[in-house]
Amino acid sequence: MNILDAAYNTVHDFPGGANALAPRIGIKSAAVLNSKVNPNTDTHHLTLLEASKIMAITGDYRVLQNLNAEHGKIAIDLPKIPECQDMALTELVLSMGIGGGDIQSVFKEMMADGRITEGEATDMSKVIHALYEVLAKLDAQVRACVEKEKA
């Protein structure tokens, strides 16, 4: 599936389809929304804001998933931590995911020729060490959230 098919399916799979979604995202006519998500129509296009609103309303993220896949990326859900509304903690978790991506790219490069050189092993060690540092910070901040609750 591609992003155009994903947009079409997201709108048409929603209960009530374009008739239900159009007014909720600020499009006056269901026909216009249908045209915007029709992969065969060149005259109307879904804007990024409209796509974002559609995903928020439908809870259907096929457009995002297909856009990510097209670019070799992934999206992850942000953690919900109701006991500790600490954005620094969320940022640490996200940086951990970014660090994981570094490990994957370094590993892919390292294994490209089927052997591991001393330089490649050193590069991998640096990435792993950086991830350890992020994990240590995460552990400390999680513990701090527990301590805040006890106080």
Image (cartoon, rainbow, N blue to C red):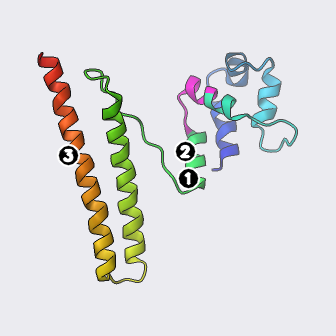
Cβ–Cβ below 8 Å for labels 2 and 3?
Answer: no
Count every numbered label the image shows and give the total. Answer: 3
Q: Residue at x 67, y 38 (%)?
A: 7
**Residue 134, how many percent across, how many down?**
27, 47
Q: Amino acid at mark 1?
A: Ala
- Select label 2 or label 3 by which is in front: 3
Task: Check disc 2 and give the amino acid type.
Answer: Gln
Closer to us: mark 3 or mark 1?
A: 3
- Please identify the dominant SS of the magenta region: helix
Q: Label 3 neighbourhood size at 10 Å, few (<14), some (14-19), many (20+)?
A: few
Q: CA distance from mark 3 to mark 1?
A: 31 Å
Residue 118 located left or right of residue 72 = left
Cβ–Cβ under 8 Å for marks 1 and 2: yes
Q: Quadrant of the C terminus?
A: top left
Residue identified by numbered label 3: 136
The residue under label 2 is 65
Q: Which mark is residue 69?
A: 1
Q: Position of residue 64 (x, y in %)?
A: 57, 41
Q: Is 32 covered by the magenta stretch? A: no
Alpha-carbon distance for marks 1 and 2?
A: 6 Å
* Element type at mark 1: helix
Q: Which residues are magenta?
A: 53-61
Side of 48 where 101 appears, left or right: left
Q: Position of residue 124 (x, y in %)?
A: 31, 68
Q: Residue at x 56, y 49 (%)?
A: 68
Q: Is residue 107 above or below residue 11?
A: below
What is the x, y in percent for residue 130? 28, 56
Q: Residues within 10 Å of mark 1 (few under 14, many from 20)?
A: some
Q: Is residue 122 above or below residue 104?
A: below
Q: Are marks 3 and 1 in contact (CB under 8 Å)?
A: no
Within the image, what quadrant is residue 114 found in?
Answer: bottom left
Residue 54 in magenta? yes
